[in-house]
Image: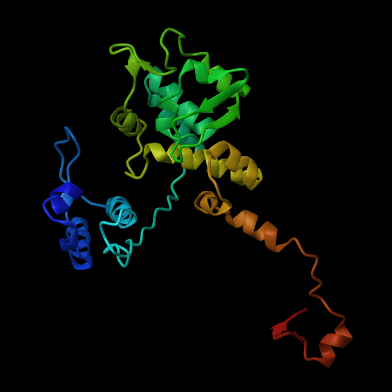
Amino acid sequence: MLNRSFGSLILHEITTHRIEQFKRERLAGKWRGHNTTGAAKPIRPATVNRELDGLKTILTKAVEWGKLRESPARAVKRLKVDNRRTRILTEAEQTAILGACPRKLRAIVALALITGARIGEILALRWEHCQDGYVTFWETKNGKARRIPISPTIEAVLSTQPRVYAWVFTNSRTEQPFLSVRQVFNRAVARAGIRTGDVTLHTLRHTALSRMIASGFDDHTVMAISGHSSTRMLERYTHPTEERKINALDLPAVVTKRSQNENAAEGGVLNGVRVG
């Protein structure tokens, strides 16, 4: 995409104005996924930001190599992105989806709901990564390996998969790991009767981590499981219920009642609030 827009230019022709124009045009554009026949979808701000990040890296390297005096992308701001996903599955929805999944997908979905791992991390699992009482995710988003203990529930899921191929979840037809399970997952969601259109594979991770936090596990424990590098990244998984808010507000033992003499003397008003 960058080559299509900037490949024919020489460096000094790549100006801040051209980059801003590229950003506007990309944001106004649409795309259609490979082998999809539905309507083209609008390009999301997060996608444009990733393309801008790539361009900025290239131009910064040009400055380091002495090919540019200053990067024209330096003043270009990234688009604002609200990537908070608030959708979590109810227990009934979770049961319905698991029941609607084919056997292989059911194990993948179950492992995602238990561990909060990304689907790509799960699909890349090899049997050699599941030994000595631990599962190690090597293909992670931040490039850092993450190891979690094999709990009884994880062991139960792994035991449903035959140890025939190198990968835990292998396409028996190709004898290679699954590259994607998105379409078959979407069909399972539809069979489960969920028509809201907001349940994606990432919803599984969101559901798992949200429940860990709601159950009272500390941030550092959840971070060790999820692979997040800061507590700030966990904010999107925190969904306090009204009951928890009320319980939090009731923690301090604040005395709001006063004696009748005090109320009478001050007209029954305490800090602007009538008390009795």
Residue 45 shows in this picture:
no
Q: Position of residue 167 (x, y in %)?
A: 42, 17
The residue most toward the top is: 164
Query: Residue, x 40% and y 17% (percent of image)?
Result: 103
Viewer-side residue, 83 vs 275: 83
Residue 254, compared with residue 11, is above or below; it is below
Q: Nearer the viewer, residue 194 or 86?
A: 86
Question: Image point 44% across, 27% down: which residue?
Answer: 122
- Residue 271: image quadrant is bottom right
Image coordinates for residue 239, horizontal then vertical, percent: 54, 52
The residue furthest left is: 8
Horizontal relation, residue 168 to residue 259: left or right: left
Tell me what residue is drawn at x 51 percent, y 16 percent.
Answer: 128
For the residue pair 134 and 272, the one nearer the viewer reads as: 134
Residue beneath the point at 31% across and 56% down: 56
Give the x, y percent position of residue 246. Answer: 66, 60
Q: Colour scheme in the image?
A: rainbow
Question: Residue 217 at x, y = what percent?
Answer: 66, 43
- Of residue 270 and residue 118, the one placed in the foreground of this image is 118
Q: Is residue 105 left or right of residue 151?
A: left
Vertical order, 213 against 247 (above or below):
above
Q: How many discs appear?
A: 0
Q: Is residue 260 left or right of residue 108?
A: right
Instruction: State whether residue 163 appears in this view.
Output: yes
Image quadrant where one finds the C terminus: bottom right
